[in-house]
Amino acid sequence: MEGKHHRTDGSELVITGLPWTRVVAVIVAATLGVVGFFAANAGGAARSSRTVSLRKTSLGMILVAANGHTLYLFGKDRNDKSACSASCAQFWPPLLTRGKPTAGPGIEASLLGTTKRSNGSLQVTYNRHPLYRFLLDKRTGQTSGEGLFKFGARWYALSAKGAAIVKGAPTATTSPPTTTTSTSPYP
């Protein structure tokens, strides 16, 4: 049966003669479709953000997040725990997950793990180093945070073995080399 459309006062459209069960079914199906779309995309985002892979950069092969952005360790972190929160975490967002992290190509799955942050969220770790991104790395392969001394310690990209990649400092030919001793594994 075809519905009849007419306006009662010029502002309201009244539809008569339509089977309302069919209209309600279409509205419910459309709503469920939209909800399902957003739920699927949210799950996909959570899955992909916790994947750790390797990428070739000017520093060599380094750990990167699913979007190809460099992952860093913070020299102040100790015992598998993050020392970066508040404003530090705004500039160096932690790589978070809701489940088990995923090892991409070249990554040793046995070195992947998680640590609980002070706010209860789970941060991805590699070789017991909590992993972070750097806010100023805007493109894949950028390593703008490498070697920076911020928030009380240095930040380094990680190798496939989970060790800090330290850029070689330029050597000076006019002064004799000096030797320093440090108890920290990071300069």
Image: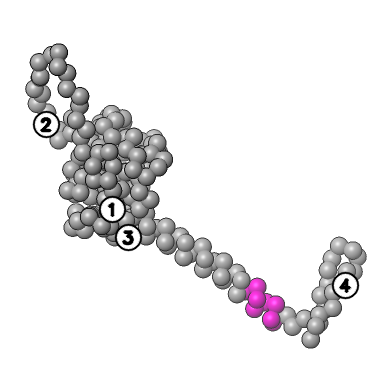
Q: Which of the two labelled residues, at mark 4 and mark 2, occupies the earlier sequence position?
A: 4
Q: Which residue is mark 1?
A: 53
The C terminus - image quarter: top left
Q: Which of the two labelled residues, at mark 2 and mark 3, occupies the earlier sequence position?
A: 3
For the rendered model, the colour scheme is one colour
Between tags 1 and 3, which lies in front? 1
Q: CA distance from mark 4 to mark 3?
A: 55 Å
Residue 99: numbered disc? 3
Residue at position x 42%, y 61% in the image = 44
The picture places residue 121, in percent across and down from the top left corner, at: 35, 51
The amino acid on which the numbered mark 3 sits, given as a three-letter code, is Gly
Q: CA distance from mark 1 to mark 2?
A: 30 Å
The amino acid on which the numbered mark 4 sits, given as a three-letter code, is His
The amino acid on which the numbered mark 1 sits, given as a three-letter code, is Ser
Say few, some or many: other residues with alpha carbon within 10 Å of mark 4 (under 14 / 14 to 19 / 20 or more). few
Residue at position x 32%, y 35% in the image = 145
The amino acid on which the numbered mark 2 sits, given as a three-letter code, is Thr
Image: magenta residue range: 21-28
User: Residue 26 in magenta?
Assistant: yes
